[in-house]
Image (tube, helix red, strand yellow):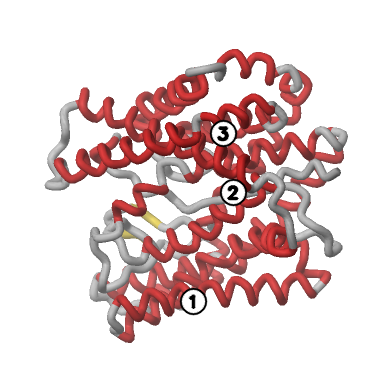
Amino acid sequence: MTTRRHDLDWLRIGAFALLILYHVGMFYVTWDWHVKSSHAGALIEPLMWLLNPWRLTLLFLISGAATRFMADKMSIGQLTKARMGRLWPPLLLAMFVIVPPQSYYEVLEAMTALGQDPGPWLENFYLKYVTGTGNWCDADGCLETPTYNHMWFVAFLIIYSLALLPLIPPMRRMPKAVSLLIKGPGLFITPWLFLFATRAFLFPIFGESHDFRKDGYLHTLYFGTFLFGYAIAKHQPFFDACVRWRWLALSLMFVAWGALMIYYHAWSDGSMPPEWLRMTFRGVRELQAWTAIVALMGFAHLHLRQNDGPARRTLTEAIFPIYLIHQTIIVVVAYYLAKVGMPIAIEAPILIAITVAGCWLFYDIGRRIPFLRIWIGLRSRSKETARPMVPSPQVPVREGSQ
């Protein structure tokens, strides 16, 4: 009998499907991004806010659980070799091959918007990118290169995987302690208190930069979530509780999301809400995040744990290469589509279709070339991916929710 957790695989696959749509959405909302559509507006922002308080937390939780399954089958040395061998090559490929076009079009669009000739700024672009000598700056700061952009998740995961190694022996005793903390109402209260505390007290200090050197808020949040995922990976009462409370959690998630939308709309004129109200809605935001995770875990465990087949096996392998390439495809294609001036009802589906096709082509070609497999996050030999490993888009910061 297989011990593989298909429900976690499907959650990972679903998160990546949303990831493509989310980053397409970033082209159309008012939040800052690499390139922007002439159709950009606030219309779909409520749907984006439905996702972004919880998605990254879920992905680090799944990554922690996946690491537990690996650690129980390997020595610490084997685990380190396996983890670093799967994470470092794609990160390096991204920084020096896949991400540079994103930076190129970001600079091109910024210079064009400022009414400046982009030619001098883009001359010898790759050399400037690699050596960090581009001096691409505006009023908001400078573009530091080489950079990992959307691959920050992998950089953080490398750090957390290494930080976990000395904690593995004591972590084997963690499920007993965790079981007391999440028993009964603790399933909702304890994780929410952790999320709320980090958002309320660390976010105002550090913000979110995705710079591994100074992201104190996100490191506390995501490493804590990673460790929690490691601790509960084989703790069946946690998943049983998620199944029991899935409908309540789903209801609370929508109530919290609705309250946040009312709050954001009330302060959309740029004025600053009183501090007590900001603090309250930091808590509401984290309530939405955790109840969404409980609901997703519950529904997935109930309906997908035994749901296996060729589609799951193929998508489980394909997901990481798709994550690796998807944002570059979106940025490049979106930049040129914006110049055509098509109606959004035609432009957006074309962007999605080209992105999906391009991602699949990247994976399909890469998996057939032995030398490329490790560079796109696959095993050196064709074999089913052993553990889920999931990234996500950057989450825009809403000033009023701090």
Residue nearest the observer in this picture, 364 or 14: 14
The quarter of the displayed image where residue 258 is located:
top left
SS for callout 1: helix
Picture layout, residue 233 above or below residue 101: above
- State the residue position of label 1: 353
- State the residue position of label 2: 11
Front label number (3 vs 1):
3
Query: Label 1 amino acid?
Result: Ala
Determine the residue positioned at 64% across, 77% down: 361
Q: Is residue 230 left or right of residue 58?
A: right
Determine the residue positioned at 50% across, 78% down: 354
**Residue 401 visible within the image:** yes
Q: x and y percent of residue 29 in the render?
A: 30, 61
Category of crowding for the residue at label 3, using alpha-carbon neighbours closer than 10 angstroms: few (below 14), some (14–19), many (at least 20): many
Query: Label 2 amino acid?
Result: Leu
Front label number (2 vs 3):
3
Q: x and y percent of residue 17 in the render?
A: 53, 60
Q: x and y percent of residue 22 in the render?
A: 43, 59
Alpha carbons under labels 2 and 1: distance apart: 22 Å
Front label number (2 vs 1):
2
Q: Tags 3 and 1 in contact by the CB under 8 Å rule? A: no
- State the residue position of label 3: 243
Query: Label 3 amino acid?
Result: Val
